[in-house]
Amino acid sequence: MLDTLWRIIDLQLPLVKSDMETFLIKDGEITEDDLKIFNEASELIKKAYYSAEKDPNSARNLVKEALTKLESIKPKKPFPPEMRIRFDELKSSLMEVLGENKVSQTTPPKS
């Protein structure tokens, strides 16, 4: 879970934020509110990373909330292809974190 969250924070979030600022805000295809929602989701992901070791369930809930926020972003026009790919990969990585957490909770520790 930590590795995936770090990859999201280090690689995916900056690219998607740059895409939103470059492709979309300047063209008026998303609103400042959409960017605000994205920034809130980013903060939730960062909080999840820092709480993941101590409280995996709390981290999972934060990731779920971030994913819900990202799903609520609705551009006026479809994202450009490269932006859509990066945005979808970000959401997919968050779903991966949720899946990893489920596996770690149900799999007994190895002796």
Image (cartoon, rainbow, N blue to C red):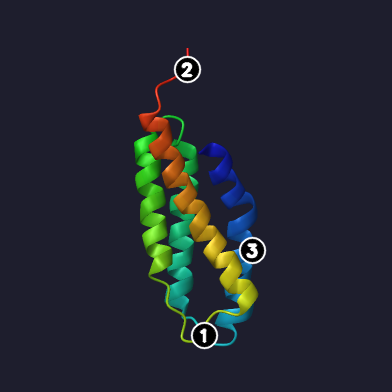
Q: Which amino acid, by three-letter code, is at mark 1?
A: Glu
1 displayed left or right of 101: right
Secondary element under disc 1, as helix, strand or loop, is loop
Secondary element under disc 3, as helix, strand or loop, is helix
Q: Which mark is residue 110?
A: 2
Which label's residue is closer to the chain start, 1 or 3? 3
Q: Residue at x 59, y 68 (%)?
A: 85
The picture places residue 87, in percent across and down from the top left corner, at 55, 66
Instruction: Give the Cα separation between the discs numbered 1 and 2.
Output: 50 Å
Q: Residue at x 39, y 63 (%)?
A: 69
| Residue of label 1 | 29
Q: Which amino acid, by three-letter code, is at mark 2?
A: Lys
Secondary element under disc 2, as helix, strand or loop, is loop
- Within 10 Å of the Cα at label 2, are there few (<14), some (14-19), or many (20+) other Cα atoms? few
Instruction: Give the Cα separation between the discs numbered 3 and 2.
Output: 37 Å
The picture places residue 63, in percent across and down from the top left corner, at 41, 50
User: Is residue 66 shown above or below 82?
Assistant: above
